[in-house]
């Protein structure tokens, strides 16, 4: 009995090789029988038998995806995840159907997870989603992906968008700078006017779990945000001395986050601290230190409230400007309606103090959002509108003080479409249309912008 797997494999190898006169139909029937035997061995947990049968098949059909998958599964059963991974990848490579690709990707993900390579496991679970032959299999892959992501100590979130815009620099709509209450008119430089072009934005957010249990979690966090601008020919004609790099920026930060369950209503307390650096126009601009505290809790069967506070210091300005200290408070609410549509609202208030009067300000923002749960035809739909008001009490234009301080009022609206038919590996292309208008008693800051952003987001 101890030699039975080897004997079986030798017999199968001989049968599969066949005599020169053997009929193709007979060989294929024998192959199917060998595959069925291997499948039953795997299902019974007989790893040694399954490996022997798979080897017999591969001796005659080295590109047989099913045999490679059997080997990968049997190797996992034998505790050899490191060897099972490459075997599963070969099964995926030689697969002839979505079902074969789906199963091979799942085994490749499991092999990676057994080695604590959770980012690799997430990649293969996304490939399983893409290959899923039906909605039930796709739902199973999504659950598997979430389980792997939750088990992972490290997580990465990526985003990217490209947005043609009529105002990439937040420039003025008018060449003349008019201050309400001041009988003088200035002329703005070309770089201060609205310049058309294209804005590309990319970001990466990193998380590494340092410690945690079923009630608390502590993470090391990091982020990198890039903004790059390409000016149109029209923009270069308006501002001939301006380069694309003048409007680019980079922000990098490193931080700590601690979360704890608290209270009887699903309460969650989160504290964060970050230290970051800003580069503008290709050179270092300043540093940022930030700390925040938030508390969220259930506000009904489908609603949740979040209260948050943030303090921030901008310091070390390369041009010698004074530090800026900002404190902010916010309250937000979200709920699911009877049809599962999502409704959100947020009210935020902030105050900035500095020896630099130009930076002193108070700001209030109200944002409302709505997202449809069910797609409209081939697309998902969401949007938001926001109103904001900013007051700079000590603002001056050169030596001219602004009577009553500078006051800006901003209105913005955006609508985004998720193109679900183009989903790939769980990533959905998005198109976002944004319109924003700012009115100010200093006309330099009266702006209009319309942009169309193309990007992607994760579907889960």
Image: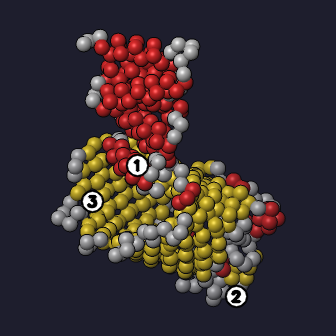
Q: Position of residue 418 (x, y in %)?
A: 53, 63
Q: Quadrant of residue 368?
A: bottom left
* 209 lies left or right of 100: left
In the picture of the structure, the residue carrying the numbered disc 1 is: 137
In the picture of the structure, the residue carrying the numbered disc 2 is: 183
Mark 2, mark 3: which one is toward the viewer? 3
In this view, the residue in front, 86 or 117, is 86
Q: Earlier in the sequence, mark 2 or mark 3?
A: 2
Mark 1 and mark 3 in contact? Answer it, CB < 8 Å: no
Q: Please, is residue 454 above or below residue 35 in the view?
A: below
Secondary structure of the residue carrying numbered label 2: loop
Q: Position of residue 443 (x, y in %)?
A: 66, 80
What's the CA distance linking mark 2 and mark 3? 53 Å
Label number found at residue 269: 3
In this view, the residue in front, 147 or 100, is 100
Q: Earlier in the sequence, mark 1 or mark 2?
A: 1
């Amino acid at each position: 009995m101890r030699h039975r797997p080897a004997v079986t494999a030798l017999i199968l190898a001989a049968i599969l090789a066949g005599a020169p006169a053997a009929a193709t139909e007979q060989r294929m029937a024998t192959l199917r029988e060998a595959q069925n035997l291997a499948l039953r061995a795997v299902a019974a947990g007989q790893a040694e038998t399954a490996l022997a049968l798979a080897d017999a098949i591969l001796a005659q059909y080295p590109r047989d995806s099913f045999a490679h998958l059997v080997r990968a599964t049997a190797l996992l059963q034998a505790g050899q995840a490191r060897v099972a991974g490459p075997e599963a990848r070969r099964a995926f490579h030689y697969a002839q159907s979505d079902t074969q690709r789906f199963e091979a990707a799942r085994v490749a993900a499991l092999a990676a997870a057994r080695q604590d390579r959770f980012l690799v496991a997430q990649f293969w679970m996304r490939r399983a989603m893409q290959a899923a032959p039906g909605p039930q299999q796709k739902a199973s892959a999504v659950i598997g992906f979430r389980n792997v992501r939750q088990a992972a100590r490290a997580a990465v979130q990526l985003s990217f968008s490209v947005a043609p815009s009529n105002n990439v620099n937040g420039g003025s709509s008018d060449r003349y700078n008019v201050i309400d209450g001041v009988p003088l008119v200035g002329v703005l430089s070309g770089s201060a006017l609205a310049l058309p072009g294209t804005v590309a934005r990319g970001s990466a957010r990193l998380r590494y779990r340092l410690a945690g249990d079923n009630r608390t979690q502590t993470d090391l966090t990091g982020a990198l945000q890039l903004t790059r601008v390409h000016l149109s020919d029209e923009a270069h004609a308006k501002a001939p001395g301006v380069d694309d790099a003048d409007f680019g920026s980079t922000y990098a930060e490193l931080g700590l986050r601690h979360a704890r369950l608290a209270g009887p209503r699903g309460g969650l307390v989160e504290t964060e601290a970050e230290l970051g650096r800003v580069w503008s126009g290709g050179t270092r601009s300043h540093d940022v230190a930030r700390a925040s505290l938030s508390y969220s809790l259930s506000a009904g069967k489908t609603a949740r409230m979040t209260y948050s506070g943030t303090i921030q210091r901008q310091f070390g300005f390369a041009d010698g400007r004074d530090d800026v200290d900002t404190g902010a408070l916010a309250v937000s609410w979200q709920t699911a309606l009877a049809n599962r549509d999502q409704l959100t609202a947020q009210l935020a208030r902030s105050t900035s103090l500095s020896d630099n009067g130009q930076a002193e300000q108070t700001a209030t923002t109200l944002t409302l959002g709505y997202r449809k749960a069910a797609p409209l035809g081939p697309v998902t739909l969401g949007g938001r509108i926001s109103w904001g008001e900013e007051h700079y009490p000590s603002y001056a234009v050169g030596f001219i003080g602004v009577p009553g301080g500078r006051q800006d009022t901003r209105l913005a609206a955006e609508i985004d479409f998720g193109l679900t038919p183009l989903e790939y590996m769980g990533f959905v292309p998005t198109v976002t249309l944004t319109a924003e208008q700012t009115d100010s008693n200093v006309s330099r800051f009266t702006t209009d912008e319309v942009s169309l952003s193309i990007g992607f987001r994760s579907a889960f």
